[in-house]
Image: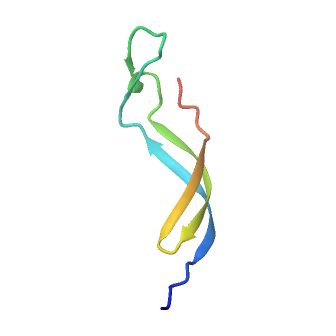
Amino acid sequence: MDHPKTKVRPNLKLGRYFSYLIGGEYSFTNYPFEETVNENFKKFDFGLSRGVGINFNRYTLDIFYNLGLNNIAE
């Protein structure tokens, strides 16, 4: 019986990202009330993205890290 060979290949990802805040809420454990995210954060963000991964035949396992370059907290 002939078994297919598993192809394992590493991959490297480098790039940039742009994002836009649509909405959301946050709260703190010791903070008595919740506020909307839109009131305290800027809507646009951008930064650098990098990652490594392994391809197994048709499947990919990736680990990413995004480094924000914009101060989003007002």
The image position of residue 64, as x and y in percent, is 58, 51
Say left or right for 62 vs 27. right
Question: Considering only vertical position in the picture, is 7 above or below 18?
Answer: below
The image position of residue 66, as x and y in percent, is 59, 46
Choose between 25 and 58: the one closer to the eye. 58
Residue at the top extreme, as displayed: 32
* Residue under the point 50% across and 91% down: 2
Q: Picture quarter containing residue 62?
A: bottom right
Q: Picture quarter containing residue 39?
A: top left
Q: Picture quarter containing residue 13?
A: bottom right
Residue at the front extreme, as displayed: 1
* Residue under the point 49% across and 10% down: 30
* Residue under the point 35% across and 32% down: 23
Choose between 58 and 13: the one closer to the eye. 58
Say left or right for 23 vs 2. left
Choose between 56 and 62: the one closer to the eye. 56
Residue at the bottom extreme, as displayed: 1
Question: Considering only vertical position in the picture, is 38 above or below 8?
Answer: above
* Residue under the point 51% across and 85% down: 4
Its colouring scheme is rainbow
Question: Considering only vertical position in the picture, is 60 above or below 67?
Answer: below
The image position of residue 24, as x and y in percent, is 36, 30
Q: How many marks?
A: 0
The image position of residue 45, as x and y in percent, is 51, 40
